[in-house]
Amino acid sequence: MTPDDLQAQVAGFLAAHDPKTTDRLEFLRARYDAGLAWVHFPEGLGGQGAPRALQPVVEAAFAAAGAPDNDPRRIGIGLGMAAPTILAFGTDEQRTRYLRPLWTGEEVWCQLFSEPGAGSDLAALATRAVRDGDDWVVTGQKVWTSSAHTARWGILVTRTDPDVPKHQGMTYFLCDMTAPGVEVRPLRQITGEAEFNEVFLTGVRIPDTQRLGAVGEGWKVAQTTLMNERVAIGGNALPREGGLIGMVSKTWRERPELRTPELRDRLVQHWVEAESLRLAASRLRQQLTAGAPGPEGSAMKVAFSELNQKLTGLEIELLGEEGLRYDDWTPRRPEKVDFLGREAGYRYLRAKGNSIEGGTSEILRNIISERVLGLPSEPRVDKDVAWKDLPR
Amino acid sequence: MSELPTPDLLYSEVEEDLRASVRDLLTDQASPAALLARVETSEPYDLKLWKTLAADLGAAGLMVPEELGGHGASARETAVVLEELGRSVAPVPFLGSAVLATSALLAAGGSVAAELLPRLAAGELTGALAVPLSTAPGAAFPATVSVNGDGTLSGRAGTVVDASVAELLVVPATGPDGPGLYAVEASAAQVTELVSFDLTRRVADVELANAAARLVVSGAAAEAALDNALTTAAGLLASEQTGLTEWALTTTVTYLKGRYQFGRPVGGFQSLKHRLANLYTDLVNARATARYAADALAGGFDVPIAVAVAQARVAPIAVHAVEEAIQLHGGIGMTWEHPAHLFLKRAKSDELAFGTPGRHRARLADLVDLPA
Ligand SMILES: Cc1cc2nc3c(=O)[nH]c(=O)nc-3n(C[C@H](O)[C@H](O)[C@H](O)COP(=O)(O)OP(=O)(O)OC[C@H]3O[C@@H](n4cnc5c(N)ncnc54)[C@H](O)[C@@H]3O)c2cc1C
């Protein structure tokens, strides 16, 4: 498989499905069925087993033709996290049922992992799932759940055995967000919006056919999700000056009255960092041909969060008098995180979450130091203790 | 470098007493929950609290001499009040009225100032200085308001701090006779509150259309009075920023002692302990630097350097400290219910107020002869 082969395939597809005249969903479904959704996925599941590094070739060819976007709401959880996890651990029925509407955007996904008492220490979670015939009955509370209010499905980790050490007693499910007992309450955040939610699960019945992976193997399944999450957050394919650096550079070019030599020096430093981060992300994607992200994703995510925070902080300083203002504090429930569609104050505040969501920078540094550098871990008091006996 | 007088960097007993009463009041009247409930209502400022602070505790008149109805204290005591206001982000117009407008009139002198200062000092009158909050000491005299032939004023000043609750506006304006500071009743101006980044300290646009005005001072003395107000405010703001830093550190330490993950309090992880120790180190530096600026302002020595150092050093410390507080609180720190965001919004707008750290560094380079 070469880039040319794929370009030829896309050209053939476009000849048969003119994006100008074809219905949006019909187009996307056909693209999935043609194996041109994510080319590295298996045949029949939106792909054709091609190297993952070739995906950008396909994306570029479709974008150039004005093809519809399969993720207009830019909710990365389905594409970035649920999909690779379902691919890795799902049964054939599950893969067939979930991946196609996930990719076309017909079904939005959310991630029901964190709980009030279990954030960084996800394996401490307390949401219980108890077997009852062909179903599981789930009760507990999740928190900070991004886009739960727009989601049709949630990836859910639960505790199925409190008597074994915490990592061993967890099980992973696909949760129907419309099922009785699922209650989503908006949770307002620093920006004024309610982008994330509290989710209360009260006696929610989940059929065993919606279990992902074996009973008690939830931690292993969740690891796959988390590794992919870091890459999804930190490893975006961007053109030069894509994203926030482009935004600030544009303001700089258009507003000479704001410039000072000191700010210029800092902006150029950030420009260089953004360029090298972009290259590191490309290099990471090139390494990912096998489709299994390693701990490098953690490094990307740390670097990406820090750069976003420095840049958005600089942008406010640059704006001076205008930086004292905010665009809108109205509590809204947005459909997506709109980093570039809003003003500097929003970007500054929202970027604070980048180093918390998807694993905090502290936890990612621990992962890098222990798994990449092989440094010894801190003494663990919780490894061999039954979950129910852990101090909380 | 010339010999400097030995500064007093400690707090006097009187200052500690003042702190205690301000802190008691704010603990009682300005809890984070009360603040959050207030910020989005039609009364974002707590004017009852302001009256108590300004009049009953006498905080508004600290820098005003006794013969003008004040307490004849100094910038040092005012700084202590600002530290406490920083620790609580209480929504009162102390900066705009007791610091900016009051300093401008004190430096201006003359009969109009002598008539207005006792009322400001007594908390009967709330004032604001009609320049953008981002204006740095040493900036050129603003040219956005002009004096008409009949002595009225026309023009505008944007992002004026605390203007929406001020009755008195001190307005820098330029007429045929050059620069002047004017007193304008806020009712003669159109004051439009903006959507402020800092929810507990508001900014407003002030429009003047042939507004009746009284001249306070003119010429070079007007320029000096304006610069004095900006310099005093920039120097004293470092005390508010020290208060913000202290809040961030103590709140985060308390939280991390009680938050368990991985079967132990997260504050026990060495990487976090070092971060908190760094914040403490920053706080020690911030406090001494802010104290020096207050003492220099009170004593009238080394003022330009003390103020430039204070803003170059303490403003970024406060922003960093509150950013760390949010990060170390994890998901809870990103929520609206937790008060950390109110402190972040204050710290970041304080960083812009009276010139960014970058501008103060550039100014300092000139002051201490480190040419480009
Ligand atoms: C904007 C946003 C969106 C989110 N969306 C989702 C979502 O969709 N689904 C979902 O499940 N979750 C979501 N989260 C939750 C997120 O994953 C957690 O907030 C995160 O894992 C941290 O957990 P915590 O908040 O409990 O912090 P804690 O674990 O309590 O951590 C507090 C502080 O201690 C540090 N710390 C903890 N342990 C250690 C250690 N061993 N060594 C050093 N430092 C440590 C942390 O880094 C942090 O700074 C979201 C969070 C945010 C902010």
Image: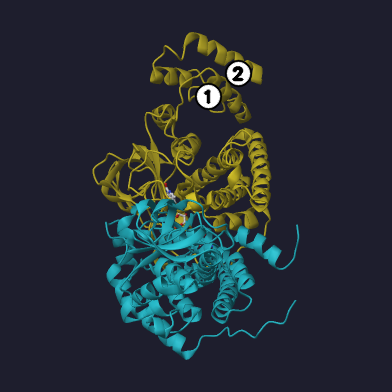
Chain colours: A yellow, B cyan
Task: Between residue A317 and residue B114, name the one nearer to us.
Answer: B114
- Specify whether A262 is left or right of A137: right
Task: Between residue A98 and residue B145, name the one nearer to us.
Answer: B145
Helix, strand or loop for disc 1: loop
Task: Give the percent coordinates (x, y) of residue B67.
Answer: 40, 84
Which of the image's four quarters has the C terminus of chain A? Answer: bottom left
Mark-to-mark CA distance, 1 and 2: 11 Å
Task: Between residue B122 and residue B251, name the one nearer to us.
Answer: B122
Judging by the rendered image, the residue that carries numbered circle 1 is A47
Q: Is residue A280 above or below residue B119?
A: above
Helix, strand or loop for disc 2: helix
Q: Is residue A235 above or below residue B210?
A: above
Q: Quadrant of residue B115?
A: bottom left
Q: Visible in this render: residue B302?
A: yes
Amino acid type at circle 2 is: Leu
Q: Is residue A36 above or below residue A371?
A: above
Q: Visible in this render: residue A358?
A: no
Task: Between residue B9 and residue B305, name the one nearer to us.
Answer: B305
Judging by the rendered image, the residue that carries numbered circle 2 is A6
Nearer the observer: mark 1 or 2; the answer is 2
Amino acid type at circle 1 is: Gly
Q: Are marks 1 and 2 on the same chain?
A: yes
Q: Residues within 10 Å of mark 2 (few under 14, many from 20)?
A: some
